Image: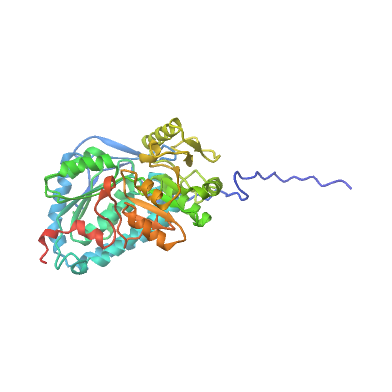
Amino acid sequence: MAKKKNTEEPVAKPAGGLFAYAPAPESPAAAGDIATSYGHFIGGEFVDSSGNEALKTVNPATEQVLAEFAQGTEEDVDRAVAAARKAFADWSALPGSERAKYLFRIARIIQERSRELAVLESIDNGKPIRETRDVDLPLVAAHFFYYAGWADKLDYAGFGPNPKPLGVAGQVIPWNFPLLMLAWKIAPALATGNTVVLKPAETTPLTALRFAEICRQAGLPKGVVNIVTGDGRTGAALTSHPDVNKVAFTGSTPVGRAIAKQLAGTRKKLSLELGGKAANIVFDDAPIDQAVEGIVNGIFFNQGHVCCAGSRLLVQESVQDELLDALKRRMGTLRVGDPLDKNTDIGAINSAAQLARITALTDAGEAEGAERWSPECELPGTGFWFKPTLFTGVSQAHRIAQEEIFGPVLSVLTFRTPAEAVEKANNTPYGLSAGIWTEKGSRILWMADRLRAGVVWANTFNKFDPTSPFGGYKESGYGREGGRHGLEPYLNVEALDV
């Protein structure tokens, strides 16, 4: 009897694993209409810039231009600050319970429009839709809910009875978490009775401009929130404006240092959340598989575009080989590609400029003698991409162990004793975060007490909550955002009747 011919197509084996993941794309149409050009949001209205210069924002995964937006001028900043100053009198006079209603309304609208905002963020920023959908947007709404709860309880926040708002807050946010950083800044400012002029990053302005629409949808009084787009020139005009009472900046350490010099001698309050070079410290008694997941989350979440990323892995010598073998196996399963694919783990690098910086620093790591390793993966032909990468044989003197790379690059160092781990972890100009992996609670407390970092995670990493303060030491900045502590930068402590 003749054998039946097999007419089925052969199934290709997926690289690096047993299971293949079919594409699971989120529709870009869910982002809603993106205008071809945008002006500023001033006094509750979208207005044209006083200048003629326009910038472009592109999709990092495709390099396609998404929209043009205005380059803010000093005159534009003047108008925005004037609108915020005009709105301040009525907004600050509202009872806290009334301000809370607006914040609650904004939070609910964000929840209702979360899919739209998540897709828009992924398109404009390059981060995977899984992260914008499951991390960014829930935290954005949670921050507005949380600070809405504080608005009528400021007398009990620990800053004295009847605390007063400062006035107009000038806020400049980065491109790595555009909408979340907006929430970190705007929610406490409004809860405490201040008005706001915010400048989003020049590579990721779209969700801030969509937030302006949400402010109108929520019925927020005109001028309470103003958004002026542009590059660093616009940011400098805002932070130096004489009628701004409070400056909040999240971004690079060099720019933060320049702002601090600019404001020296003025009466403006300043909070800075700057760079980081966090140590993720793994002891020999740590659960290896759990630690590996924490390491991966610590450095490859958001393509490593995280100020508190665990970019230095300090592993105890006795478990180095076992841990690195497990880590390499796990890195081999990471999926790099289309940010709108729900299976994607690592999306696109935010810009060509940032990709060039990552490339230059990793090349320097190889030139200085560190050993580079990346899993096999095929990168898309267009867009800005970088393979997840780790370096072994790294010394404290290497640039990749000292400078913030802000990309999916992990430097591996070793230690023998807890004291040596502390010494190496603190051997950095930064002091934003750290992670500790061990089964011993006493060791966690001993380490946490000695690590010079604003946030210390124990047997986890990159966990955020609006009730918990966040900020750093040394060149990572000063001031705290989040929690009760996040109210203080927006209150006039000198005026408190204590």
> Does residue 112 appear in this view?
no
Pick out the residue farthest to the right.
Answer: 1
In which quadrant of the rendered view does residue 159 lie?
bottom left
Asked if residue 143 lies left or right of residue 299, the reply is: left
- Number of numbered tags placed on the structure image: 0
Q: Residue at x 44, y 43 (%)?
A: 413
Asked if residue 497 lies left or right of residue 191, the reply is: left
Residue 84 location (% of width, % of height): 16, 52
- Quadrant in which the C terminus appears: bottom left
452 versus 68 height, above or below: below
Q: Residue at x 51, y 47 (%)?
A: 320
Please state which of residues 447 and 227 is positioned toward the viewer in this rendering: 447
Residue 225 location (% of width, % of height): 22, 53
Please state which of residues 450 and 263 is positioned toward the viewer in this rendering: 450
> Does residue 175 appear in this view?
yes
Asked if residue 107 lies left or right of residue 376, the reply is: left
Please state which of residues 224 and 434 is positioned toward the viewer in this rendering: 434
Residue 250 location (% of width, % of height): 28, 47
**Color scheme of the displayed model:** rainbow
Residue 63 location (% of width, % of height): 41, 37
Please state which of residues 108 and 284 is positioned toward the viewer in this rendering: 284
